[in-house]
Image: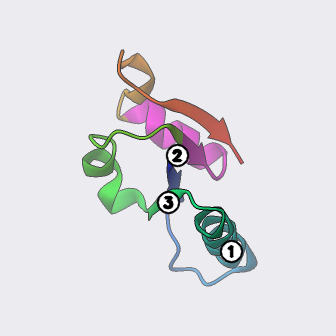
């Protein structure tokens, strides 16, 4: 399964950033193709075909809505982590 994991920024070096990286690594260890991306890459990455996108928080869901991702007919399902 190809899984996109969207976190607005990983630059803060907080516990949440480490948790998201560990989550991505764990999914990759299970054999999934994982693409972890941040806000500057958002619109470009959304042109990729994902089976599912994990939004790591409510800010990320707002970002997805801002770029009208939920209006796309070809969009992958979005899961809130």
Q: How many badges with numbers are in the image?
A: 3
Q: Secondary structure at mark 2?
A: loop
User: Cβ–Cβ below 8 Å for labels 1 and 2?
Assistant: no
Q: Which residue is mark 3?
A: 34
Q: Which residue is mark 1?
A: 22
Q: Is residue 78 magenta?
A: no
- Disc 2 and disc 3: Cα gap in Å? 8 Å
Q: Position of residue 17 (x, y in %)?
A: 64, 74
User: Cβ–Cβ below 8 Å for labels 2 and 3?
Assistant: no
Q: Which residues are magenta?
A: 53-66
Comparing labels 2 and 3, the label whose residue is closer to the camera = 2
Q: Residue at x 64, y 53 (%)?
A: 56
Q: Residue at x 48, y 58 (%)?
A: 33
Q: Position of residue 67 (x, y in %)?
A: 35, 34
Q: Position of residue 75 (x, y in %)?
A: 41, 26
Q: State left or right for residue 54 relative to residue 73.
A: right
> Looking at this view, is 30 or 70 the one in front?
30
Q: Is residue 42 above or below residue 12?
A: above
> Looking at this view, is 5 or 62 the one in front?
5
Q: Is residue 3 above or below residue 41?
A: above
Q: Is residue 60 magenta?
A: yes
Q: Earlier in the sequence, mark 1 or mark 3?
A: 1
Q: Which mark is residue 1?
A: 2
Q: Position of residue 1 (x, y in %)?
A: 52, 46
Q: Is residue 73 above or below residue 7?
A: above
- Residue at the far bottom: name it: 13
Badge 2, how many Cα within 10 Å: few under 14, some, many 20+? few
- Disc 1 and disc 2: Cα gap in Å? 18 Å
Q: Residue at x 55, y 57 (%)?
A: 32
Q: Secondary structure at mark 3?
A: strand
Q: Earlier in the sequence, mark 2 or mark 3?
A: 2
């Amino acid at each position: 399964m190809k899984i996109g994991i969207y976190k607005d920024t990983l630059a803060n070096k907080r516990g949440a950033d480490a948790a998201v990286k560990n989550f991505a690594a764990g999914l990759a260890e299970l054999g999934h193709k994982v693409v972890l991306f941040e806000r500057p890459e958002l619109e470009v990455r959304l042109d990729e075909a994902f089976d599912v996108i994990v939004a790591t928080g409510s800010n990320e869901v707002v970002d997805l809505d801002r770029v009208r991702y939920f209006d796309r007919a070809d969009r992958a399902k979005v899961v809130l982590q």
